[in-house]
Image: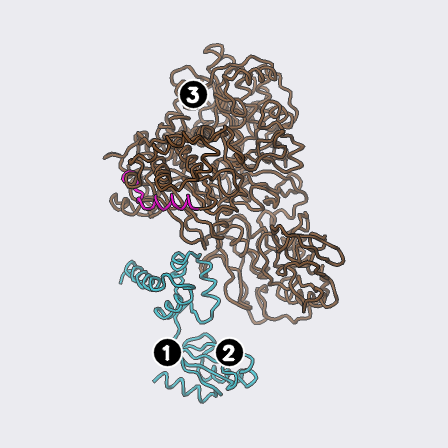
Amino acid sequence: MKDFIIPSRDMGTPAVKSDVTVTLTVDGIAVSVPAGTSVMRAAAVAGISVPKLCATDHVSAFGSCRLCVVQIDGMRGTPASCTTPVSEGMVVHTQTDEIATIRKGVMELYISDHPLDCLTCAANGDCELQDMAGAVGLREVRYEPGASHFAKRSAEGPNPEWRPKDQSNPYFTFDPAKCIVCSRCVRACEEVQGTFALTIEGRGFDSRVSAGMQSDDFLSSDCVSCGACVQVCPTATLIENKVIEIGTPEHIVKTTCAYCGVGCSFDVHMRGEEVVRMVPSMDGKANRGHSCVKGRFAWGYATHQDRKLEPMIREKITDPWRVVSWDEALGFAASRLRQTQADYGRDSIGVITSSRCTNEETYLVQKLARAVFGNNNTDTCARVCHSPTGYGLKTAFGTSAGTHDFDSVEETDLALVIGANPTDGHPVFGSRLRKRLRQGASLIVIDPREIDLLKTPHMGLGLHLPLRPGTNVAVVTSMAHVIVAEKLYDEAFIREKCDWDEFLTYAEFVLDPKHAPEEVEKLSKVPADLIRNAARAYAAAPRASIYYGLGVTEHSQGSTTVMAIANLSMLCGNIGVPGTGVNPLRGQNNVQGSCDMGSFPHEYPGYRHVSDTETRELYQRVWGVELSPEPGLRIPNMFDEALAGRFRGLYCQGEDIVQSDPDTRHVTSALSAMDIVIVHDLFLNETSNYAHVFLPGSSFLEKDGTFTNAERRVNLVNRAMTPKNGYEDWEITQMLANRLGGHWAYTHPREIMAEIALTTPSFAGVTYDLLEREGSVQWPCNEAAPLGTPLMHIDGFVRGKGKFMHTEYVATEERTGARFPLLLTTGRILSQYNVGAQTRRTDNVAWHPEDILEIHPSDAENRGVREGDWVRVASRAGETTLRAHITERVAPGVVYTTFHHPTTQANVVTTDNSDWATNCPEFKVTAVQVSPSNGPSDWQSEYQTHSDLSRRILPTAAE
Amino acid sequence: MTAAELAADFRDRLDAILLAHVGREGPLLPILHDIQAEWGFVPEAAEPVIAAALGLTRAEVHGVVSFYHDFRDHPSGKHVLRLCRAEACQSMGADALADQVRAALGLDWHETTPDGRLTLEPVFCLGLCACAPSAQMGDRLVGRATLDKVRKLVEEARA
C-alpha cells in the first residue's frame, strides 16, 4: 500500500489463522503471533516496520526484493523476513551493520535503473521506493549510467529498452519506465482478483510487466480494471489518472460502495471536497480490501455534466421543464398530491422506494406513504428482482434473507451457483469464490449460459448444467429426487432441524418418476447424468454452499425455485455451518435494506404484515397517526390501476422504472395516465420523461446513512462532500412530507436509525455508535446478538422447523412457437450497472458501449446473421434492434442480452408474465424471433423523439 | 489458401498438438516444443488457444514463452549458429571470437542472412566449459571453437 500520505498500516504479509500462538523477540520486544506468521508481520505487530519493496499484506510473500533481510540468532546468513516463518523463542534483529550494508547495496541497484524525477512524479510523497531510499539511508549511487529502462534516449540514439506509457485504460496509466519489477501487480491480479491478466515477460534485465501477450495493451488484455494492481504498486508505474491530474489526497472518509449487493467498504481519498481516488478498505468485512472497476473507478457520474442540481416542474409531460425554487417545486408537488387524493380517494397515490438510497431514506419514503398519504401504496425495485427470495426463504427458514456471510465462502468445499454470474454481477464475491475454487473447492453451475466462472484459471473442471430458460424448478427438484432416491440425504439433520413427517411426504413427492433426471432431461435439455452427478457431488461435499441470483428469481416460478433450493440445502444439512448455506446474490447496494425497511405494500419494516394489530399499533403510537390495515398496491398493480384511472400519483425515488421494469410500453402508458409523477433522481432518467416534478437527488458521496448488503450487513455511508443539489435525499423526502402535514423533525440519519431500532426487533441493537465502533453489523442485532449475526439458523431455524415445500414444475406461459422460436434471457456485464444511469456516465463505456445480442452460430446461420450485424428482436410484447455477437456461450435456441442502455430498451421485448407469489417479472424468459435489420425499430425512433422533447428545459428567467 | 483456410489449417495443426498432450502432467513446455517444431517458432495466435486448453490465461502462456530464449516469436533461418557468451567462454576469448564471426558472416546477434539460410544467436552456457569457447550449429556442439572451425561449420551447413 502506498501508505505514506495517509497511513493505513501494511503488515507486509497476509494474516495467518492458527490455534497455536508463537512468542518471539524482535529488537528486544516480545511479541506473540499465530504460528505460520512471517517474521516481517510479527515485527509489524511489534510496531517495527522492516524495509520492503516486493512484500505487501494483500498477497503472499515472494522474497524477491532482498530489502527485508534480518538477522536471527542461531540462523545462518540474512534471511528475508517476509518468507521466514516465526518460531518459538526466536530472537530477531532488524537493524545491524551487516543488514544496513546489504540494504543500501540493494537500494543502490534499484535506483541505478530508476529515473530521479521525484519532484514531478505522480507518486511524489506516496512512493514506497522513495520511502525505502530514505529508510535505508541511501546517500549516493556509485554505478555509472549504463543500460537502463527509463532513459528515452542515450548518447548513441533511441534507447531500445525504453517503452512508452500504456494509457489504454481510461482510469490508470502504466509507465514501464518507473517499474522495479517487484511483481506485486502480477501477484495481486492472480491472488486477489483471480484474472491472471498480467505476467512478467522475458528474464533478467529483459523482465517486464506485461498485460496479456506481446501485442496486447491493458485494455485489450484480459484485464477487468479492478485496480488491485494499481493499489499494490509501490511506485508511479501503475497509478490512477486522477492522482496524476489532482495530486495526492490529504484525508480519508470511510464509506460503502453504492453499486452491487456485495457492499464493499471503501476509503474515499479526498483533497478538500474533491475525490482523488476510492480505495477498498482492508478492514471491509464484505470485500477484505478488494474492489471491482465500478466501485473503485466509476464514480465520475456524481460530477457528470448531465446531473441536474435544481428542482424543475411542468404542468403537462409534453411541456418543457421549468427550473424553480425548492419551495415552488415542493409546493407544486404537495398540492397536486393532495388534490389527487381529494378527487380520487386516499388510495389514488403511492411511492416507489429506491434500492440505491440508504436505509434511512427508504424508511422515510415508506413512512411517507403509510403515515402521510394514509395508505400502504409503497413498493420497491426489489419487486422486479429478489421479491421471491424474501418470500421463498421466509417460507422455508423463517427469514427473508441469505443465511451466511461472504467470509463463509473461504470454507466451502463445493459451490453450487444457480442463475448468477458473479464475476460480472458481483465481482468482488466472484474473486473470493475463484480464490476458493483455485484452492480446490468444486463448482457446479446451473445456467443457460457458459458463465466466466466456469473458465476460472487454475480451477480444474467445473460441472455445467446448461438448462433451457424457465426450467429451474424441474432441474433443482430433480437433484432432490436423486438425493432422496439414492438416500444421500442427512437424516440426522432433518430429524433434528426439520419435521420428519413433513419430510416423508416431501420424499414421496420428489420420488415421483416425473422428477427423475431422465424425464427432466426432456424438458430442460440437461443430460440426465449431469443432473445425477451434480446431485451426488452436492450431497457428498462436506460443506456445500448455494449462491443464486436473478436467474432464479425473475421467473414465473421464481419463488418455487427459491424453495426448491432451500429444500436441497436442508436435505443435505447444509445450513448453520460456515461454508454452507443458501445465499442470494442481491442486485443493488441496498436492495436487502429497502426490503428490510418496509418498502413492500403488505409489510412494515422487519417483514411484519400490515394487518398485524400489534405492529400497527406500535407504529400508530410512534408516528401518532391512524394507519391502514389493508395492503397497498404492488408496482404492476399500480400500473394496472393507473390505466383504469384509479391510481393517479406517484413519488418515485432513485429508480428508473421505465427502463428497468418489463413491458416498457405498458409502463409508459400507465405513467402517461397519471396526474402527478414526481421523480427524485440524479439525472433526468427515462421515467422523468413522464414526470411533472423533478427533485434533484444526492449521490452516495454526499450523504450520511447506511446500506445493507446481501449478507444482511449494515454498513455506514459517510458524507464525503457537500450535496451539490443542496440537500441529502432524506431531507428532501422530509420537506415533502412536511408540506403534506407530516411534522417530521429529523436532523440527522442517526435519529432515523434510532426510530428504526425502536420499532423493529431485528434492528433493536443497531445504533450509529455501534456501527462507528464495529465498522458494520449483520442483522439480527438485538439483545440476543448485540454484535449482530454472521450466520443464521445455527441452532435451528428461525421459524422453528425447516419447511420442505413441494415444488411442482409448471411450465411458463411464455412458450416458443413458429413465430417466436427462440428464448431470450437477460443479464449483466461487469463494467455496467443495472440501467446504466451511473456507469454510462463514466469511462466504463470503454468496455461496453452498447447492448449486444448473443446468439448461437447455428441460429445465426439459419437467419443469415453475421457477427456485428444489426438484428431485430421481436416478442409478443414488442421489438427492438441491436447488434449481434455470435458465440457458443449460449445454447442453440437461446439468445442473451443485457439491459444497460436506454437506446436498446431490451424491456420493450419482455412480457408482463410474473412470479405467481410475488409478481416478480419473468425477465429471464421471453419467446422471440431474431431477424436481420437495417437500423432502429419504429418504437426506438418514436421513443427517442419523445425523450428529446420531454427533456427540454426552459432557459432560467433573468433575476 | 484463403485467409479462412489458413486459419482453419492453423487451428487443425494446433489442435492435433494439444490433443497429443491431453492428460499429461506439466504439458505446457512439451506443447511449446511441438509447436516450435511444427512452425519453426511459437506463433502468438497459438498462445490464447493453449491457454484455453490448459486452464491458463494468455498472459501466463506469454510469460513462459518469453522466458525461454529458445522459443522464438518469428521463424529463424534454416540453420542456427549459437556462440556461447557465458563467463567460462568469455575467459577463453569468446568475445573476440564473436567479433570475428560477426564480421566474417556480416551478421549481428539475432540476425538472419538475406537468403534465409543462417541465423546467429548468442547462448549463455552450453555446458562445455572445459572446452571453452564453445559453439553450436543445429544440434552439433563444437568445443575450442575458432573462426576457422565456425567457418567450416557454416560452409557444411550451406552445402
- Residue A265, compared with residue A359, is above or below; it is below
Depicted A750 relative to depicted A149: above or below: above
How would you rate the neighbour count of disc 3 (Cα within 10 Å): few for under 14, some for 14-19, many for 20 or more? Answer: many
Q: Where is residue A684? Give x, y as percent.
A: 49, 30
Mark positioned earlier in the residue sequence (1 or 2): 1
Q: Residues within 10 Å of mark 2 (few under 14, many from 20)?
A: some
Is residue A881 visible in the rendered structure shown here? no
Which residue in the structure is indicated by mark 3?
A: A638
Q: Is residue A523 magenta?
A: yes
> What SS does tag 1 mark?
loop
Q: Amino acid at mark 3?
A: Met
Nearer the viewer's eye, disc 1 or disc 2? 2
Q: Is residue A602 magenta?
A: no
Q: Secondary structure at mark 3?
A: helix
The residue type indicated by label 2 comes to: Cys
Find residue A917 and report its image quarter: top left
Cα–Cα span, label 1 and label 3: 81 Å
- Camera-side residue of A425 and A5: A425
Q: Position of residue A239 (x, y in %)?
A: 58, 52
Colour cyan maps to chain: B
Mark 2, residue position: B125
Residue A38 appears at what percent x and percent y? Answer: 64, 57
Mark 1 belongs to which amino acid?
Arg
Indicate the chain coloured brown by its letter: A
Q: Which residues are magenta?
A: A522-540
The residue that mark 1 highlights is B117
Establish whether labels 1 and 3 are both on one chain: no
